[in-house]
Image: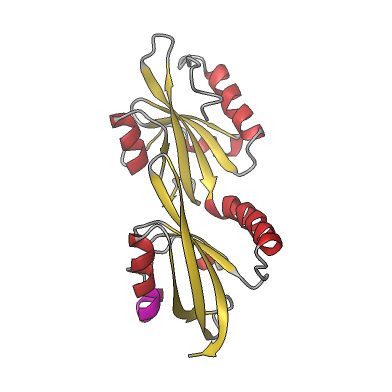
């Protein structure tokens, strides 16, 4: 976002200019659901593409990442959340300033976690299969340190909270491993959970690491199945 916003004053009274900026960002970023100008009051003033304009003038001050931007203007990456547009996503935002260098609002990109992660997982799998001999039966999931699932091959798990969702309540080994994943940036372990079809339980071995942006961390977990049944 710094490419489009950083160091360039924004004329908040020029709708045409702002929409042109939003459209140019979308043109170069296929994983972005929409691009929005949020004013310094936390209101979504302009949104592109056109089909999302019905959400313009929505007050988003109650959203954690918007409130953080208004309090302390700085580049931000949100936690996963269900956007007013209805999709589960994360927001990447950058503060915008007018020609007097006063805070004018922010340019915010709504990024679908499954679209983003699908492409990254494909690239990572290709790399691991070539360099480390990882087999295609390996799986990936991504979790925030608070337990929210940002990505999973089973789309029904995306957006669930590992430590409180009923789906995981009876899976003690998964919950125990989840606590280790949340508290440590890297490690290894194993747990028992359903396979991707949810038809049977299986032992899964896991290794994880951490990626981060704008003071936000994500745990990236690689798993593979054992032949053992439980």
In the image, residue 123 above or below residue 206: above
Colour approach in the figure: secondary structure
Q: Judge by depth and name the residue closer to the eye, 51 or 63.
A: 63
Q: Residue 199 lies in what quarter of the image?
A: bottom right
In the image, residue 12 above or below residue 146: above
Q: Was residue 171 drawn as part of the magenta stretch in this picture?
A: yes
What is the span of residues highlighted in magenta in the rendered image? 168-174
Q: Was residue 196 drawn as part of the magenta stretch in this picture?
A: no
In the image, residue 97 above or below residue 38: above
Q: In this view, does 218 lie to the left or right of 175?
A: right
Identity of the residue drawn at 60% across and 52% down: 115
Picture coordinates of residue 51 (x, y %)?
Answer: 59, 39
In the image, residue 219 above or below residue 85: below
Residue 79 appears in the rendering: no
Picture coordinates of residue 189 (x, y %)?
Answer: 44, 73
Q: Judge by depth and name the residue closer to the eye, 86 or 100.
A: 100
Q: Residue 70 lies in what quarter of the image?
A: top left
Identity of the residue drawn at 44% across and 53% down: 218
């Amino acid at each position: 976002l710094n490419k489009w916003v950083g160091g360039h004053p924004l004329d908040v009274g020029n709708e045409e200019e702002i929409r042109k900026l939003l459209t140019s960002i979308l043109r170069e970023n296929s994983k972005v659901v929409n691009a929005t100008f949020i004013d310094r009051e936390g209101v979504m003033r302009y949104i592109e593409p056109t089909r999302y304009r019905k959400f313009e003038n929505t007050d988003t001050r109650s959203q954690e990442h918007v409130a953080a931007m208004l309090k302390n203007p700085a580049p931000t990456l949100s936690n996963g959340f269900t956007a007013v547009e209805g999709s589960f996503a994360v927001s990447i935002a950058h503060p915008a300033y007018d020609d007097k260098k006063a805070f004018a609002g922010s340019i915010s990109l709504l990024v679908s976690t499954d679209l983003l992660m699908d492409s990254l997982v494909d690239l990572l799998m290709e790399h691991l299969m070539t360099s480390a001999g990882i087999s295609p039966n390996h799986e990936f999931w991504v979790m925030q340190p608070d337990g929210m699932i940002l990505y999973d091959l089973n789309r029904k798990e995306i957006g669930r909270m590992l430590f409180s969702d009923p789906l995981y309540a009876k899976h003690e080994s998964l919950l125990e491993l989840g606590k280790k994943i949340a508290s440590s940036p890297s490690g290894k372990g194993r747990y028992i959970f359903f396979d991707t079809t949810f038809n049977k339980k299986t032992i899964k071995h896991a290794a994880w690491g951490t990626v981060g942006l704008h003071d936000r961390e994500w745990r990236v977990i690689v798993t593979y199945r054992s032949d053992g049944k439980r």
